[in-house]
Image (cartoon, rainbow, N blue to C red):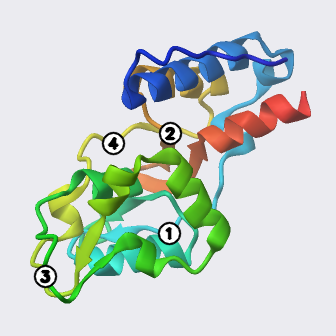
Amino acid sequence: MFICIRNPARDRKSRRAIGVRALATVIRMTTIAANLTANDIMTTEVVPAKADWPLDRLAEFLIENDFSGAPVVDDDGALVGVVSLVDLVRHDSLPETVPWTRTLADYFRHDEYKFNLENQYADEELAMLRVDGDTTVTVADIMNRDIYSVDPETPIQVVADMMAGGQIHRVLVTCAGEVVGVVTTLDLLQILRES
């Protein structure tokens, strides 16, 4: 099954939202997905970022692990938010002319990841990606405090609807308040590929 949605008049966020909604619709229509739960498709190796990390540490963490986002925990290990590369893009308060400021692209070791990032964002957005080694801005300052989570037995149709409704690309799977996994749009696409 192939779905192509194209409306160049919409902005980038709207196009992403349409893509997530289309994916949720396809997941609901797929018979293989009818009996699957978050537990069946989640990634169980979830590595959190720390709320008190400076942004240069966050950038290194995301790139080293080839992550586009991660849950955020405080000093006690309690879940306090979610952070992503998009949050780094949105954070544009760092000066552009500070000599020790590096662009996020300077951290890239994987050409494929850099290529994918360059295709997701306009040149102007990439130029704003700056990480200052001496900044006092931390992960807690830029993270999203809205946490989308489900329990392991949640049907993936509900997970897909949550992603579409929240215009997000990952849902945390929690059990007794602890993160035990994450379901991403890539996990949902894998289901489609296998059906």
- Judging depth in this view, the residue of 39 and 4 nearest the camera is 4
User: Of callouts 4 and 2, which one flags the residue occurring earlier in the amino acid sequence?
Assistant: 4
- Of marks 3 and 1, which one's residue comes earlier in the chain? 1
151 is higher (above) or lower (below) than 59 = above
Pick whichever of labels 3 and 4 is earlier in the sequence. Answer: 3
Rendered image quadrant of residue 103 = bottom left
- Rounded to the nearest whole Å, what is the CA distance between mark 4 and mark 2? 12 Å
Are circles 1 and 4 on residues that touch, CB within 8 Å? no
What's the distance in space between the residues labelled 3 and 1, CA to CA?
A: 31 Å
What's under tag 4, amino acid-wise?
Ile
Q: Which of the two labelled residues, at mark 1 and mark 4, occupies the earlier sequence position? A: 1
Q: Which residue lies under the disc numbered 3?
A: 98
Q: Which mark is residue 169?
A: 2
Q: Which residue is mark 1?
A: 47
Q: Quadrant of the C terminus?
A: top right
Q: Nearer the viewer, mark 2 or mark 3?
A: 3
Q: Is residue 173 above or below residue 28?
A: below
Q: Amino acid at mark 2?
A: His
Residue 193, percent from left and from top: 85, 34
Q: Which residue is mark 4?
A: 147
Tell me what residue is drawn at x 26 percent, y 47 percent: 144
Task: Look at discs 3 and 1 and give the one toward the viewer.
Answer: 3
